[in-house]
Amino acid sequence: MTATPSTVVNVGADLFADAVEAQAVPAARVDWRPPMTGTEDDLVAVAADPLRREANERALAAMLDVTATLVDVAPASEVLGLQRGEFLHAGPPIGWERASGPLRGGLMAGAALEGLVDDPEDAVPLFEAGTSVSLEPCHHRSAVGPMAGVVTPSMWMFVLEDQATGRRTYCSLNEGLGKVLRYGAYSPDVLTRLRWMGDVLGPLLRAAVRGADDVDVTGILTQMLQMGDEAHNRNRAGTLMLLRDLSPAMVTSGFDAADVAQALRFIGGNDHFFLNLAMPACKLALDAARDIEGSTMVVAMARNGTDFGIQVAGTGDEWFTGPAQLADGLYLGSYGPDDANPDIGDSAITETAGIGGFAMATAPAIVRFVGGSVPDALATTRRMHEITLGENPRWSVPVLEFQGTPTGIDVTKVCRTGILPQINTGMAGRVAGVGQVGAGLVTPPAEIFPKALARLAELSRGRADARTPA
């Protein structure tokens, strides 16, 4: 007589487990998936690389060791060396001919802001000719930009520093939501707001930052994750803590009281204001892990509205790209999927560092903004642990027994499991000038990870050949 098993382990599809449980036998389900198609040989080559384990340990440790401090606010011409006609943008490199609607709209607004044209729509021939203007990714200048990510010489930038090493990163000031330059809008009110930010808000913040005690951005991130923010699409607590740190110095800065009051109202009414500090803080940490030979850790994820690109610690500044995907989420007013542009922005640097979509469990209220459910948020954070090298002990998730956020995306784990990084994001209108149309959830195109893996395998095989006696 055959004994009934006390439990059954089911690997892969749930059909067998469902049938077993229907007969009152417990089944332990293992969510196993085959590696991404065509990656098997490259996975073997990278797994055999003697540098990989130590390199990944070094990369993760270097990232976790960074503390970001807000040290200044200054024009991009001053801190990035941007000259007239030079524009930065989000994502991997791209030219005007392939630029998405929101990126084009942001560039058109930037051209008018800099006085290159009187009307933003007159900027189109300027960019088509390309003789007096140039485009470059923010990442290539140690900067990050949300959504279109357009930075022009006169825009004011947050300056963050790792005071142990002196390394710095930069990000523009946050305009708010809706019809704003970073979503591709360029109407007169957009330009009026940007000019006020350049004439009043930037100089006032510079005086406050220089006159206040050091603003520990990493410390604020640590606290806000305990207060319901995930630091990508929810930054309410972070914005209020920044105001707490800077308000006294703003009030005593000597600026006109009406200007100070307007600035306080603007920041206090813009829950996303802290995002533009969270992003360069994440980049500052991840840049510490760049150029570590043999490491398979992702150090940047970025989108320009046409392409989605990643960079890896062990492959230098090379971009691995694929088509940007359309987010699945909630739309504003009468907008729908046909109105939305594919994913855009450098803000996925937050997920690359282990917050944002990776920390959705710490901010379950985010589902009201990007869609999904609270159980989905918890499951997402748990799932991201399967593709990361470790946890961040600074950034913990109370509802998961204060487990650290999943940190250090590993190209090999993504290829081996087929699990893609989860990003929560705003959605820009696909037509230049429209602005924001919604917010949602998105993943990178799957093919970029096998591309990165193939390059890592090529480098690994090259090192193996160099070690083999002739």
Image (tube, rainbow, N blue to C red):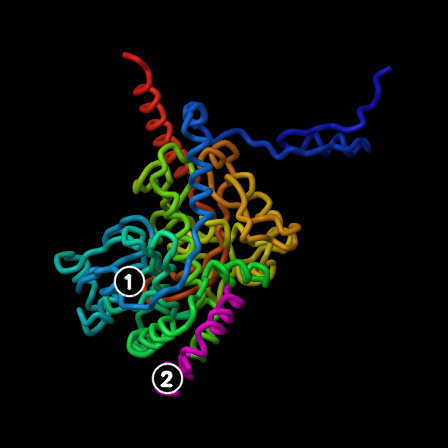
| 440 left or right, relative to 180 | right
Q: Amino acid at mark 2?
A: Asp
Left or right: residue 63 compared with residue 84:
right
Q: Position of residue 175 (x, y in %)?
A: 38, 70
Query: In the rendered structure, does residue 83 fall within the stretch colored magenta?
Result: no
Pointer 1 residue: 151
Q: Position of residue 130 (x, y in %)?
A: 16, 56
| Residue 459: quadrant of the picture | top left
Asked whether the viewer can see residue 247, the reply is yes
For mark 1, give the secondary structure.
loop
* Earlier residue among tags 1 and 2: 1
In the image: residue 180, left or right of residue 417: left
Dividing the picture into quadrants, the one containing residue 446 is top left
Circle 2 residue: 259
Q: Nearer the viewer, residue 266 or 371?
A: 266
Most frequent secondary structure within the magenta stretch: helix
